[in-house]
Image (spheres, rainbow, N blue to C red):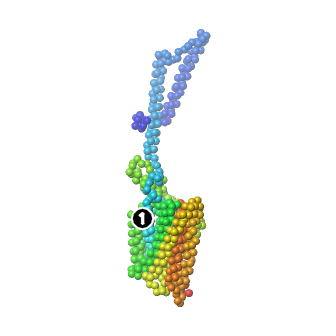
Amino acid sequence: MSPQNIPPERPIPIEDLHALLREIIPQHQHQEHTATADTNATLESSVRQHGQPTRVQPPLTTTNTTINTNTTALPLANDDNRIMRALRWRRAGNRGSHNAQSEHVPVPIRPSDCGDGMPTRWTEEVKRRVLWVIFLVQVSMNLNTTLYSNGLEGIAAEFGVTTFQVRWGGAAAFLIAYAFGCELWAPWSEEYGRREVLQASLLFVNIFALVTGLSTTWYGHIIGRTLGGLSSAGGSVTLALISDMYDPHTPGHQYATAFIVLSSVGGSLLGPIFGGFVELYLAWRWVIWIQLLFGVFVQGLHYFLVPETRATIVMDTIAKEKRKADPSCKLYGPTEMAGKKCLKWSEIMVIWMRPFKMFLTEPIVLVSSLLSGFSDALIFMMVQSYGLVYQQWGFGTLLIGCAFIPIGIGYGIGYCLARYFIKRQILLRLRKPYCERAQYEARLFWLLWTAPLLPIGLLIFAFGTSFTSQPVHWIFSMIGACLIGIANYAIYMGTIDYVLRAYGPYAASATGGNGWARDFLAGVLTPYAVPLYVSLILT
C-alpha cells in the first residue's frame, strides 16, 4: 500500500491497540467456553433421562441463536476491521518512510565514477602545465631566502645595525621560520586541499613581504621576515602534488620528483646571480619588491592554471557537479560523507609533531635528512662567503654573482644524471618486479658515486680559494663548486625519492623531516659563515 492510499482515519496508538486486543481475546474465549458448557449439560441430562445421549443441534442452527450470534459478532467485526485498518496503516506508513529514506541515502562516489576528472588520469599536457607552475612557485619561495643577502649593507645602514644582526634578524630568522612553516602548512593541505592551502601560503608571504618593505623600524622588519618564513608552505605541499598526480609505481612519479627538486635547489641560486645587479644599481628595498612582484605573478599563475589535485577534494567537487546536473543523483564525496570534522588541538599537535617524531625515531629519515640538510646548509654558507673569497681576484659585485653559475651547472648535470639512472631503475624493476632491492634500495645506488663529490668538491674549493701569496687560478674553485652542485642535487633527489617510496602514506611526514633539516641547518649556520671566513683569513 502506497502512502497515498492510507486511510484518513487517525491511527490507534500502539498502547491502545494492545489494550483493545487484550479485551477482545478473553471475550472470544468466554463465548466459546459458555457454548461448550451448555452443550455438555444438555448431553448429561439426556443420558440421565433416556439412558442415551440425545443429538443436540449446534446453537447456530436456530434462528434466535443466529441472530444473537450475528448481533454479538458485529462489534467484534468492527473491532477487527479497526485493528486491521490500523495495522495496514502502520505497515504502509513504515514502507513509505523507508522508501522516502532510501531515496535520499547518500552513495559514496568512487574514483571510477569520476572518469578523467581524477588527477592521476589527467593528460600529460595538463600535468606538465601544473609542474611548470609548481616549479615557479618553488623558485619563488627559495628566491626569498637568498636574494635578501644582496641588501645586507643597505639594510644595516638604514636601521643602524650591524651586518651580523641583519644576517640573524633577516636571513636566519626567515630560514628557521621557513623550516617550521613547511610542517605547519602540510596537515591543512590534507584537510582542505592543496590549491587552497598553497594560495593562502602565497598570499600571506606576499602580505608580509609588503610589511617588510614598508616597515620603518628594525623590529617591524624582523617581524615581517619571520612571519613571511612561517607562511611559506615549501616542499611539503609541492611534493604532495606529485603524489596526487602520479602513481608512485609509475616512472612519471620519479621524473616529476626530479623536476621539482631542480626547482628547489635552483631557486636558491637565482638570488645571488641576479642579486648583484640589484645591489649595484638599485636601493636595498628593491630586494623586497622583486620578491613581492615575482610572488604576486606566481600566485596569479597558480590561481588560474593549477586546479585542485587532492583526490578527496576533487571527488567532492565532482559529486557536487553530478548532483547539480541531475537532482536524482545520490553520489557524495568522501569529505561530505564524513561530515564536517572539527579538529581538536590535541589532534593538531599530534599531526604537527609527527614529522619531528619520525625525524628522531626513524633511522632512515634521520640519516637522509642530516645528509641532505648538511649539503644544503653548505650552499647557503657559500652564498654568504663568496664576497670574501673572490676579492683576491678582484671580482666585483656582478662577477661575484656570476661565480654562482658553476653551482647551477652542477645542478643541471645532476638532473641529467638523475634521468639516466631513473631509466636504469625502471628497467631493473621490470626485470625483477618482486625484488625489494629493485623497488627501494636501487633508488639510492647512484648516491654511491655522486655523494662523495661533496667532500671532493669542498676540498677543491677550499684549496682553490685559500689566501696565499700567489693564489691559484679561480677556475679550480669553480670546478669544486660545480662538483658540490652535482652532489647537492643528487643527495636531495636520492633521499626524497627513496623516502617517498619507502613510507607510502606517511611520506609527507617523512619528507617534512628532510625539508626541516635543510632549512633549519641552513638558517642556523648562515649567520656564522662570514665571521668564520674572516677569522680564517686573519689567522
Identify the residue under disc 1: 129
Instruction: State the SS at label 1.
Output: helix
28 or 449, which is in the foreground? Answer: 449
Neighbours of disc 1 within 10 Å: few (<14), some (14-19), many (20+): few
Q: Is residue 535 left or right of residue 217?
A: right
Residue 211 visible in rendering: no
Res 63 seen here:
yes
> What is the three-letter code of the residue carrying label 1?
Arg
Q: Residue at x 40, y 71 (%)?
A: 294
Quadrant of the frame with the N terminus: top left
Position of residue 335 measured from the top left corner of the image (x, y, whole percent)? 47, 55
Height in image: 30 above or below 138? above
- Where residue 206 appears, as percent x and y from the top left, is 41, 70
Residue beneath the point at 41% across and 52% down: 322
Give percent across and percent down for residue 326: 39, 49
Residue ID at (41%, 53%): 320
Quarter of the image where one finds residue 218: bottom left
Quarter occupied by the C terminus: bottom right
The relative height of residue 344 versus residue 45 in the rendered view (above or below) is below
User: Which residue occupies 50% across, 85% down?
Assistant: 473
Is 399 or 199 nearer to us in this picture?
399
Query: Which residue is situated farthest in the top direction here?
Result: 50
Q: Is residue 485 above or below residue 79?
A: below
